[in-house]
Amino acid sequence: MRFHTIAAGTALLMLSATASADFSGTIALFSDYDYRGVSQTAGDVALQGSLDYAHGSGFYASAWGSNLDWGDDSDADIEIDYIVGLSREVGDSGVAWDVGLLYYSYPGLSGTNFLEVYGGFSVEHLNFKISYSDDFAGVGESAWYIDGGYNYEWENGWNVLAYGGYNFGNAYDRSNGLPVGWPAYFNWGAGVGYTYKHAYFELKAVDSTLSGIYEIDDGVFENGLRGILSVTISIP
């Protein structure tokens, strides 16, 4: 974690001296923190925030945080993620590509920290991304996540969104993977949003294909069908 933080900070200082740059941030309140179809706050409220940097060259960096609830036996109460990447549009085609690194850190339970590399592209309102980690959630096994989505915005501030993803890899091998023992699974979400000045409101439904003994309808790592309401304030 320290290496990636220092590397990101050094890059920021070097680039800010040579071209245009922009700093921003967000503060958000969610009725539940959903990560790829699984609640990270036991179905309860999550307070989240980010500090973001975007450079004219396409380079970007971000630090993002949220509270967690992984149960009484877990020492992980906070998640802090560090992101560095590069994104550019291909001429005036409406096609853009994006590659980067995302480091998940969990103060109090550092054994679950892990690094993920990702790459993707977008075309108008559609986007696609693939992510890979060779030590997913610190279990020593690899995992892939392939996801895609659609987001359409009207000039009156309303938007609709839909997305889906597939979680798979050795980390989902029940014999030596995640402690929860989940097999590979799909997750999805769909909803509506509204932007008013610096505030964005969203209501969506999320679910996963985990079923039977793997389905959790309430509490820690809840992964069934549920609704999530959120409000995000952008600064500035």
Image (spheres, helix red, strand yellow):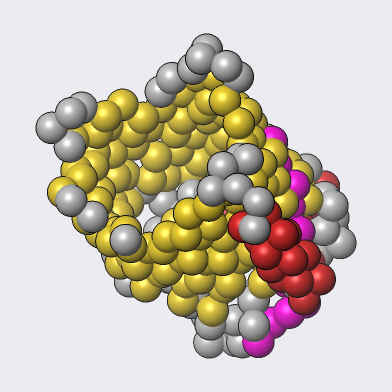
**What residue sits 18% from the left and 28% below the top?**
155
Q: Which quarter of the figure is the N terminus placed in?
A: bottom right
Count the marks.
Answer: 0
Name the foreground residue: 220 vs 89. 89
Residue 119 found in image quarter = top right
Percent coordinates x, y for residue 85 in the rendering: 67, 47
* Residue 233 visible in the current orientation: yes
Vertical arrangement, residue 188 with respect to residue 106, above or below: above
In this rendering, position of residue 71 left or right of residue 61:
left
Q: From the viewer's side, name the closer residue of 202 and 179.
A: 202
Residue 87 colored in magenta in the image: no
The magenta segment: 108-119
Quarter of the image for residue 96 reads top right
- The answer to if 117 sits in the magenta stretch is yes
63 up-or-down from 156: above or below: below
In the rendered image, the residue lying farthest to the left is 156
